[in-house]
Image (cartoon, grey):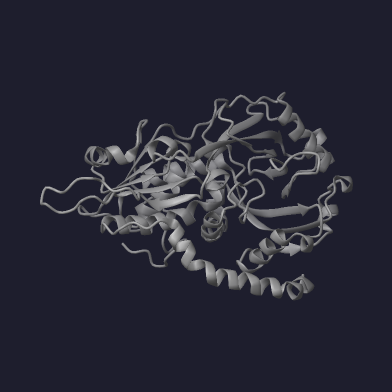
Amino acid sequence: MSNPIKGGLVFWRDITPFPVPLKTPTSSSPTILVIGGGVTGLATAWVLLDKGYKVKIVAKEWASWGTKQRLTSQIAGALWEFPPAVCGQHTDAISLQHSKRWCIVAYHIWDAIAASEELREISGVRMKGADFFFPRPIEEDPQQMSKMLEILSAGIRGFRRDRNIIKERNIDEAYGAVDAYEHLAPIIDTDQAMKWLTKLVHLKGAKLISKTLYGDLFDQEACLRTEYGADVIINATGLAGTELAGDASCYPIRGGLIRVINDGSDFPKLDHALTMTADPVHDSNEIVFIVPRNDNILLIGGITEPYEDQLSLTLDSPIIKRMRSRCDAFLPRLRNAKLDKEYPLAQGLRPFRQRNVRVERELRRHDFWGEDGSDRDISRIVHSYGQGGAGWSLSFGCASDVLDLVEEALLDLVPRPMAIEVAQAKAPETYSLRREQRNGSQIMARL
């Protein structure tokens, strides 16, 4: 069951959208227990099912529709972004090192899904222009310059750097945007996609179990494996990592998005995502984030409120009013936008960690021996949580690494912390980045 390409999955070769697993499990195939029913858990289950594993998914709740609170995975703006994202908090070296690789894996899989007319309709995934605006020339911002050069070299389609994009998108020049670039990016109707993913993994053979688990998984690992007949446990629970992984570094970042009608009746229909970092008036947690979904809904955002854990925002909350005013000033035609009466304000808690995104085997050791006298102290728990607001962007990349970690766990190999792998890869990447920066003026001359 080895992964053909270490660190990467290829659509149609390694996973397929057919309602049967790519590789049929046998009576001796290992059973994997996935805990978590969000996009991270479902994408991971899909990958495991197509590799021939038996899969059971336990979740406190599943995707839902209507006027009630929806899953965090459904609340997400779901605009694919190359890290660090405009509204992201993943800026440590470990997260950046891995996230750049994970997001490219996901990019190509979402792109392949969107390439099929039939899959586009049932999945809610489309490739659209994503425009990024900057308050000063990109060359004057070393971080943005480096990011742009990496995007150029990453195989992302449709890149175009052109200041004329500001006028083309009818951005108010008084707002302060002076530079811009765009590229094609997956934009995902999260309600439709979650419905599709849930149904797909079920048809491929996953058993869906509604149950809330409490306490540190490590302390109850043996009992859980016995109860569910599991050979490996995957923790993809988001904020529940505080309890289920014994990880005090987990914390929420509250976000909110206004939903307006984007059918062309009140203003020219917007078909590009538009984003810009915070203006000088507000802090870095308040940005312009305007994303057209695929169901005639336009999302207007965005905000990030670290450590706010209550879903208590309303349209009259000061931060939401500032968000709407900021986006109206940026794109004046939005002043005519009408609210989605059924679900005007989406809010959720993004699951972050104070440290890096964790895609890693459990490092703690059990203090017991097997009945045959052998040492059985190595845990078979694999973690995949802390993706924050980038769950859709990192989904299949994280799932690819989880697949490798599952195979290691089945062999009871000694687990390695993520930082070791980053340290090994740091030197060549640093050299490559410095080389790109030295050649930057030549690349810019061609744009």
Residue 60: quadrant of the picture: top left
Q: Which residue occupies the foreground of this view, 373 or 7?
A: 373
Q: Is residue 304 left or right of residue 318?
A: left
- The quadrant the N terminus occupies is bottom left
Q: Which residue occupies the foreground of this view, 70 or 236?
A: 236
Q: Residue at x 63, y 40 (%)?
A: 295
Q: Which residue occupies the foreground of this view, 422 or 391?
A: 422
Q: Residue at x 59, y 69 (%)?
A: 430
Give the percent coordinates (x, y) of residue 147: 66, 61
Q: Using the rendered image of the protein, determine whether residue 9 is visible from the camera's viewpoint.
A: no
Residue 156 vs 353, above or below: the answer is below
Give the percent coordinates (x, y) of residue 336: 81, 33
Q: Using the rendered image of the protein, determine whether residue 2 is visible from the camera's viewpoint.
A: yes
- The quadrant the C terminus occupies is bottom right
Residue 292: quadrant of the picture: top right
Q: Residue at x 89, y 45 (%)?
A: 174
Give the percent coordinates (x, y) of residue 279: 79, 44
Residue 384 vs 158, above or below: the answer is above
Q: Residue at x 54, y 56 (%)?
A: 99
Residue 151 vs 133, above or below: the answer is below
Give the percent coordinates (x, y) of residue 269: 76, 43
